[in-house]
Image (spheres, rainbow, N blue to C red):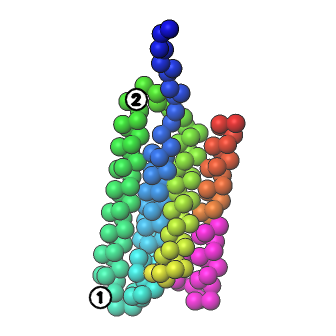
Amino acid sequence: MTNLKQPSARSFPLSAGLILGLGLGGFFDGIVLHQMLQWHHMLSSWYPVTTIENLELNTFWDGAFHSGTYVALLIGLFTLWRSGRLSHFRWSTRDLVATMLIGFGMFNLVEGIVDHQVLGLHHVNETVAREQWLAWDLGFLAWGGAMVAVGMVIMRRRHA
């Protein structure tokens, strides 16, 4: 009797899409909310941007945050590139979009719970009245949850 090795199923590296989504979520937050809209900075609830010193401190930590998101994108790209060279790799736009949505949404959920609620480092929109901060934070969490849900639906439909 011969031992025939079954070829492995062709698959997409889900971790690549998740990591890319996390990195993109961080870049969106940092570029749009920190820099363009200037709704908050990394430590702006602890060190309000009311002095040059606090602005410099927040800008430094915004940069550290951006560095982390940049590293996440590099890891995601490296994972995708490395996987793309394997014989069992299967290119899938749907899987890439789905996992990136899940990763982006997971970024919002973790950042929204840990940084906004648990640590109170900053809140989504600190330019509005303080009484409205929680509503903006909850909206950010809902947006993250919606992205995870849409990504999961795309994955289920693809693999059903």
Measured along the vertical axis of the image, is residue 45 above or below residue 37?
A: below
Q: Which mark is residue 118?
A: none
**Number of the front mark, 2 or 1:** 2
Residue 20: % across, % down: 45, 50
Please say whether residue 36 is one of the residues in the magenta stretch.
no
In terms of secondary structure, what is the magenta stretch mainly?
A: helix
Q: Earlier in the sequence, mark 2 or mark 1?
A: 1
- Given residues 157 and 43, the one toward you in this image is 157
Q: At numbered mark 2, what does the secondary structure look like: helix, strand or loop?
A: loop
- Residue at 40% from the left image edge and 29% from the top image edge: 86
| Residue 53: numbered disc | 1
Q: Residues within 10 Å of mark 1 (few under 14, many from 20)?
A: few
Q: Which residues are magenta?
A: 124-142
Question: Label 2 amino acid?
Answer: Leu
x then y, percent, for residue 63: 32, 69
For disc 2, the marked residue is 86
